[in-house]
């Protein structure tokens, strides 16, 4: 669209009922022949919209547009308004500010005289902005020398005090939708536009001492006066800009990242009331001696700093990370190993749903490529097993076998040699718990965590700043799922309890007679015992069938038996009971609550954790020899009562 010579006023409103009337009264007299007024209500929950409609109705001849959107922030509000702009220059106004009566005429004249793309005037805060008397004194605007350096390193900017060429705002694709506050992001992207690619002409920026706008001195819950929100958005805006503009001087990039990093450490110290002996203060001091962090490392620090602040408006975190490729190294990946890693990969994919994930089994085959593949077909994009990589000293001194660059590399094992070999892979972030995270780009602490699945889960949760630890549902819609659904059709009115009575060795098995007693209790309480018997437990089948004629044995109805079969049939159950066995982990993978019975094996290390209702009964509580048969029948039944 060809732009006409004139001014488009864009006013963004969110819950400004106390101010919007005065704001519009300061703008409307300036909406002359070659002007338009675009108002965006950003999902106000007060009477702002009602007041705005009333004012526009009383100025029916005004060239105006009212856009109503859900609350997504001023950046997206401005971008929506930009699509309706028809004039050469844009005057932005926040819904609680008053602008000078001659601001539009003054700014467009100065911009044309100096051939500017962006002009900033001065601004002040007053208790009662509507009573402020703007001076008639004329201030000549000046060209802003080294504008980019000052804006980039000092966080300089504003909104209601600027006027911008429409063409300049279109060139930078409007406001950054990944940033809530645009006051710093917009001038940064305008002044540094030419760093995006070779051959681009720098935009011309001007400044003036003339007061262009007055804002109310104090507003409760105002975004710009929320220092945490301002610093959070300023930091992300700078990192976004660096990642999108590869031609910035390296020294400036380093200075900016260092400033953001220190800002985060200072905020953390202040928030946690840490002393000068704290780790954060040591990190702060060390950054003056040595600093070698890329944008992703610094962005992590920003996320971590404001993770728990509920007053910070955060946009789509996954888009800010911009993680496209993830590499995961595993050593052994047999059935038990793979099941332990499943919560980790499920959580990781929920955090980075658009990323391409490569699963690399360096020391053998991976069950994710074979029997468990249906579980991860939507989670893992590439699986390579039997890679024979990560075990030889010579690999430390030879060229890396993996030449591709990744955004994040996860090392899920803890052997030092393997970790050192993996460190040679090109990546922005290397995550490894080896030697207490000594070689990791990001360090966390799970020294006290003994559970293997939780340890791995913690690696992926490093990047989870949504404050939601719920693992997404596991998709297993296969032909067997339809068969299972039909199998349970006649039992829809009964609760079903999945039971795994076997194990790889006899000393892991709770007595079979106890499982029969449990089953009789279930049947008396209108619940169905559902036994999951693998090849090693087939000798139980006829015995249990005789003792419990009303029990169900789903796996005995399937020809092509696989671990997936157990998971699918268990998904229709309300509870699982199992010894410490692979079958128990398969039940847990079905995301049903579990009662797990442990004998001599380490319950803390191997217990399932994906369901918050899980119960562990440990023989050590009842017997010095940790014999599983010491777990009382009545204690198991007591726990069952809580579920049925």
Image (cartoon, rainbow, N blue to C red):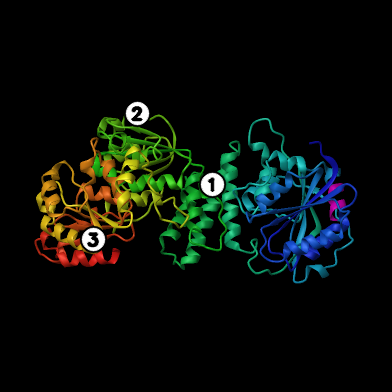
Residue lying furthest bottom in this view? 127
Decide if residue 23 is on the left or right side of residue 248: right
Q: Are marks 2 and 1 in contact (CB under 8 Å)?
A: no
Q: Mark 3 highlights which residue?
A: 616
Query: Percent from the top left, x then y, of residue 572?
Result: 32, 51
- Seen from the viewer's position, the closer of residues 425 and 99 is 99
Verify whether residue 17 appears in magenta.
Answer: no
Q: Residue at x 37, y 35 (%)?
A: 424
Q: Mark 2 highlights which residue?
A: 401
Q: Residue at x 57, y 61 (%)?
A: 228
Q: Mark 1 highlights which residue?
A: 320
Alpha carbon separation for disc pair 2 and 3: 43 Å
Of callouts 1 and 3, which one flags the residue occurring earlier in the amino acid sequence? 1
Decide if residue 173 is on the left or right side of residue 122: left
Query: Percent from the top left, x then y, of residue 553?
Result: 21, 47
Give the tally of numbered discs. 3
Q: Residue at x 89, y 60 (%)?
A: 137
Please provide the residue range marked out in magenta. 103-109
């Amino acid at each position: 669209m060809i732009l006409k010579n004139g001014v488009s006023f864009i006013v963004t409103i969110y819950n400004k009922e106390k101010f919007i009337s005065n704001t519009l009264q300061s703008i409307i007299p300036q909406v002359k022949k070659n002007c338009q007024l675009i108002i965006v209500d950003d999902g106000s929950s007060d009477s702002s919209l009602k007041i705005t409609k009333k004012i526009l109705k009383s100025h029916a001849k005004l060239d105006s547009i009212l856009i109503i959107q859900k609350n997504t922030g001023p950046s997206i509000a401005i971008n929506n308004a930009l699509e309706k702009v028809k004039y050469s220059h844009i005057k932005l106004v926040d819904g609680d500010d008053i602008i000078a009566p001659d601001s539009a005429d003054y700014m467009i004249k100065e911009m044309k005289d100096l051939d500017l793309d962006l002009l900033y005037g001065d601004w002040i805060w007053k208790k009662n902005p509507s009573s402020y008397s703007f001076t008639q004194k004329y201030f000549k605007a000046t060209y802003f020398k080294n504008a980019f350096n000052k804006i980039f390193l000092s966080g300089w900017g504003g909104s209601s005090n600027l006027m911008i060429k429409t063409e300049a705002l279109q060139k930078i694709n409007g406001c950054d939708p990944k940033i809530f506050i645009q006051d710093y992001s917009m001038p940064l992207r305008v002044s540094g536009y030419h760093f995006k690619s070779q051959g681009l002409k720098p935009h011309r920026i001007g400044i003036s001492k003339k007061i262009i706008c007055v804002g109310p001195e104090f507003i409760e819950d105002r975004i710009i006066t929320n220092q945490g929100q301002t610093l959070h958005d300023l930091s992300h805006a700078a990192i976004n800009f660096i990642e999108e503009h590869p031609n910035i001087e390296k020294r400036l990039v380093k200075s900016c990242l260092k400033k953001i990093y220190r800002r985060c450490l200072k905020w953390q110290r202040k928030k946690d009331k840490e002393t000068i002996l704290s780790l954060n203060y040591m990190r702060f001091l060390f950054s003056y001696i040595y600093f070698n962090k890329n944008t992703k490392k610094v962005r992590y620090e920003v996320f971590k700093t404001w993770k728990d602040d509920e007053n910070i408006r955060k946009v789509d975190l996954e888009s800010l990370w911009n993680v496209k490729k993830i590499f995961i190294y595993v050593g052994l990946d047999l059935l038990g190993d793979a099941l332990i890693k499943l919560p980790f990969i499920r959580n990781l994919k929920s955090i980075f749903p658009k990323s391409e994930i490569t699963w690399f089994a360096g020391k053998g085959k991976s069950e994710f490529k074979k029997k468990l593949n249906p579980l991860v077909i939507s989670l893992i994009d590439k699986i390579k097993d039997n890679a024979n990589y990560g075990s030889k000293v010579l690999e430390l001194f030879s060229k890396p076998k993996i030449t591709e660059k990744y955004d994040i590399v996860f090392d899920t094992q803890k052997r030092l040699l393997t970790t050192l070999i993996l460190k040679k892979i090109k990546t922005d972030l290397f995550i490894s718990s080896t030697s207490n995270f000594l070689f990791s780009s990001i360090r966390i602490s799970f020294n006290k965590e003994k559970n293997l699945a939780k340890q791995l889960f913690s690696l992926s949760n490093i990047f989870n700043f949504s404050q939601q630890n719920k693992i997404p549902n596991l998709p297993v819609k296969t032909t067997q799922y339809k068969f299972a659904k039909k199998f349970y059709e006649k039992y829809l009115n009964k609760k079903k309890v999945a039971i795994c009575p076997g194990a790889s060795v006899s000393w892991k098995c709770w007595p079979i007679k106890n499982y029969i007693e449990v089953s009789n209790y279930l049947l008396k309480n209108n619940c169905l015992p559902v036994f999951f018997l693998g090849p090693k437990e087939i000798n139980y089948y006829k015995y249990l069938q005789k003792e419990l004629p009303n029990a169900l044995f789903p796996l005995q109805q399937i020809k092509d038996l696989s671990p997936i079969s157990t998971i699918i049939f268990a998904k229709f159950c309300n509870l699982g009971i199992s010894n410490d066995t692979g079958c128990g982990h398969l039940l847990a993978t079905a995301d049903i609550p579990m009662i797990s019975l442990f004998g001599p094996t380490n319950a803390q290390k191997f217990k399932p954790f994906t369901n918050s209702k899980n119960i562990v009964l440990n023989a050590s509580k009842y017997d010095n020899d940790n014999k599983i048969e010491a777990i009382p029948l009545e204690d198991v039944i007591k726990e069952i009562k809580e579920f049925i």
